[in-house]
Amino acid sequence: MTFDPRTIATPVYDALDGLRKLTSQDETRLKEQKNQAVELYTYLSTWGMMRLKAEEQALNQEGKKQVVKKFFECLESLSAVENLAGNNGLAVLKNLGTEEYLGLTGLGLALAQEFSFWAAAIYWDIKGE
């Protein structure tokens, strides 16, 4: 079977493009979305998948929370690990076997790189922190 790189790129593009096009977005929320999308890889590689999922519940900045939710929705879709994006996602991660968790983390890192790339393209006109 041939790997098609659009398998990962398309859902990420669609997720961020959909967030960008939501109505009633202000500059602050767009900056939060862009910054979170760019920072996903660093956070995931430093703290890990379980911490990122736990952080989703703790985030009080709606723009950042939206991006993390979309990340886990994309990861669930690509990995076919059920209930990963939902409220029980942390328990799902905790109960995975070692090989499955490490594989999911690898896929998550590749996905996070796509989020960073597409954030620069989709939020091209959003500047600053």
Image: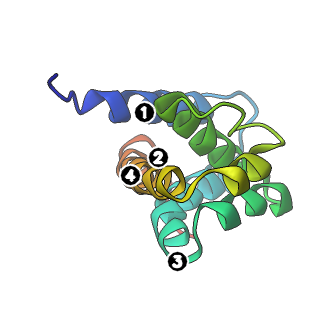
Q: Amino acid at mark 1?
A: Tyr
User: Mark 3 and 4 residues: CB-CB less than 8 Å, in contact?
Assistant: no
Q: What residue type is disc 3 on?
A: Thr
- Disc 4 is placed on an element classified as helix
What quarter of the picture does the N terminus occupy? top left
Q: Please name the colour scheme applied to the rendered image.
A: rainbow
Query: Counting residues from the N terminus, which is met first, the one under dot 4 or under dot 1?
Result: 1
Label 2 vs label 3, nearer the camera: 3
Q: Mark 4 highlights which residue?
A: 120
**Distance (Cα) linking label 4 and label 1:** 11 Å
Is 122 in front, or is 68?
68
Q: Nearer the observer, disc 2 or disc 1?
A: 1
What residue is shown with label 1? Answer: 13
Three-letter code for the amino acid on which mark 2 is drawn: Tyr
Location of residue 95 in the rendering, given as x and y in whole percent from the top left corner: 71, 52
The amino acid beneath tag 4 is Ala
Residue topped by disc 3: 46
Query: Of tags 3 and 1, which is closer to the observer?
Result: 3
Query: Are discs 3 and 1 less than 8 Å apart at CB?
Result: no
Instruction: Kindly give the residue lying farthest to the top in the view shown.
Output: 1
How far separated are the C-alphas under marks 3 and 4? 21 Å
Q: Taking 21 as reference, is 102 left or right?
A: left
> For this rendering, which residue is in front, 125 or 86?
86
Q: Residue at x 82, y 43 (%)?
A: 88
Between the C-alphas of marks 2 and 3, the distance is: 25 Å
Which tag, 2 or 1, sits closer to the chain's start? Answer: 1
**Relative to 107, is 32 above or below?**
below
Q: Please give the residue where the numbered disc 2 appears in the rendered image.
A: 123
> Mark 3 falls on what kind of element?
helix
